[in-house]
Amino acid sequence: MSMIERNRQLITTAVEKHRELIFDTLDYIWRNPETGYKEFKTSKYMEDAFENLGYEITRAEGITGFYTVLDTGRPGPEVLILGELDSIICPAHPESDPVTGAAHSCGHHAQCAALVGIAAALKEPGILDALSGRIRLCAVPAEELLEIEYRSELKKQGKVKYFGGKSEFLRRGYFDGVDLAFMVHTGTSFSSRKGSVGCIAKNITYKGVAAHAGSSPWNGRNALYAANCGLNAINAIRETFKEPDIIRVHPIITHGGDMVNAIPETVKLESYIRGSSFEAILAANKKVNQALCGAALSIGTNIEIIDIPGYAPLVNDDNMVAVAKDATEMILDIPFTYNPVMGSGSTDMGDLSGLMSVVHPYAAGAVGRAHGSDYYIADREAATVSSAKMQVAMLYLLLENGAERAKRILAEFKPQFPTKEAYFAYVDQINGEGDRITYRDGMAEVRL
């Protein structure tokens, strides 16, 4: 029997032995969707699953999530495998939480199920015998960048500094010592893209003056009208965004007034600015702030804009993409496709890609629109069991033969930032807050 066939049989048997545990995890997390930094039931379920498998875990202090490290006992690089705990908010989904509107129409529940399958397989006798180095398994919170106001409050309380779970874990040192990382997202095929855009998050408050909407509206300054002007102004500058920069701006109004009989005094918006590079994102953000402030000036309101570092652009390492492709074709005997175009979604996996060699590929199994009301896992086997097999096979390709392939990838990788401290020093410059207009003596001074 060839080494490839031996590994294939060993991995397949080790994962398939735990199919029931994998499916139980999938079903539980699907039934209990929770948004970022609120994944209390989800994190507890995953923690219990890992501890029942014999792992010693390190829980994140004060927030959800955890990690564990498995040492082969032979020297080599450390590989990080991630699974995301959080859901999105999609009240229109037929199986959303009736109270919170949360739903796993993102596929993260399948990631968690696959991660449990990987953890179980790695405890099987003989599975680590051919590997060198260390393996870090991490259940990470808060990938979906939503509920900005809630996360801003967590930041004020000192519970987090960054809104994305991977960014926060990176800051806390939970990934110190990691050399390479991968995370397999649920999609419609086994595949990968070149990467995806980064983003910054915005919290916007138009500040007007309340007045009776019927008897004396002229005494007010309508914050809702100012916000509408701001949204229209953003639409008016869209043609100035260059196609290669893949700029996406998509604001929503989260608070539009308090009662119909009063001129709205406070109107709140949230938005992202997405783009293919930090430079493109920051240039677009300046234009958007100019449009938003111009709208406030036209109505005579003020505007508070809070700019918050979101996620860095994700750049998948070509060498790691090749590992994902080889692993899929070896263990599953199906094609793995590659799209050389950068996607227009964002993920905090991008925060890792500027520091270490990463890949963020996809597993098959999902149907419907991502983040939509018709999203489901239609092929449970592909989304969880096959995904777990693929990921264990990736470990083998990286860490077998004295971790030869992982060492070669590390030798060829050139990080964008030399250290995590350098990375955070850069992104921290994005932070901005406060009122942007000062009215004085018939004049207005604007700070973009």
Image (cartoon, helix red, strand yellow):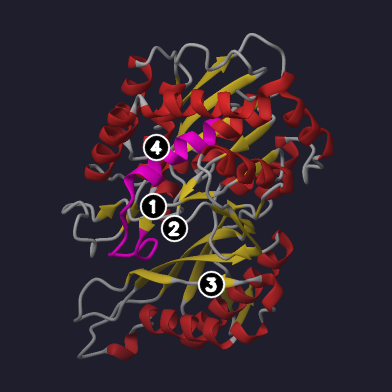
Does 353 lie within the magenta span?
A: no
Q: Nearer the viewer, mark 1 or mark 3?
A: 1
Q: Residue at x 44, y 18 (%)?
A: 57
Q: Residues within 10 Å of mark 3 (few under 14, many from 20)?
A: some
| SS at mark 2 in the image | loop
* Amino acid type, label 2: Thr
* Of callouts 2 and 4, the N-terminal one: 2
Give the SS element for disc 1: loop
The quadrant of the rendering that contains the C terminus is: bottom right
Judge depth for marks 3 and 2 and give the one in front: 2
User: What residue is shown at x 39% (from left), y 78% (from top)?
Assistant: 223
Which residue corresponds to mark 4? Answer: 385
Of the image marks 4 and 1, the number of the one nearer the N terminus: 1
SS class, disc 4: helix
Residue marked by disc 3:
249
Whether pointer 3 and pointer 2 mark residues with C-beta atoms closer than 8 Å, the reply is: no
Disc 1: which residue: 365
Q: Nearer the viewer, residue 368 or 245?
A: 368
Which residue lies at the image location 75% right of the left edge and 35% below the top edge? 419
Local packing at callout 2 (Cα closer than 10 Å; few below 14, some 14-19, many 20+) is some
The amino acid at mark 3 is Val
Task: Reply above or below: 404 against 445.
Answer: above
Q: CA distance from mark 3 to mark 2?
A: 26 Å
Inspect this view and state whether residue 85 appears: no
Which mark is in front, 3 or 4? Answer: 4
SS of the residue under disc 3:
strand
- The x, y position of residue 397, in whole percent, is 65, 31
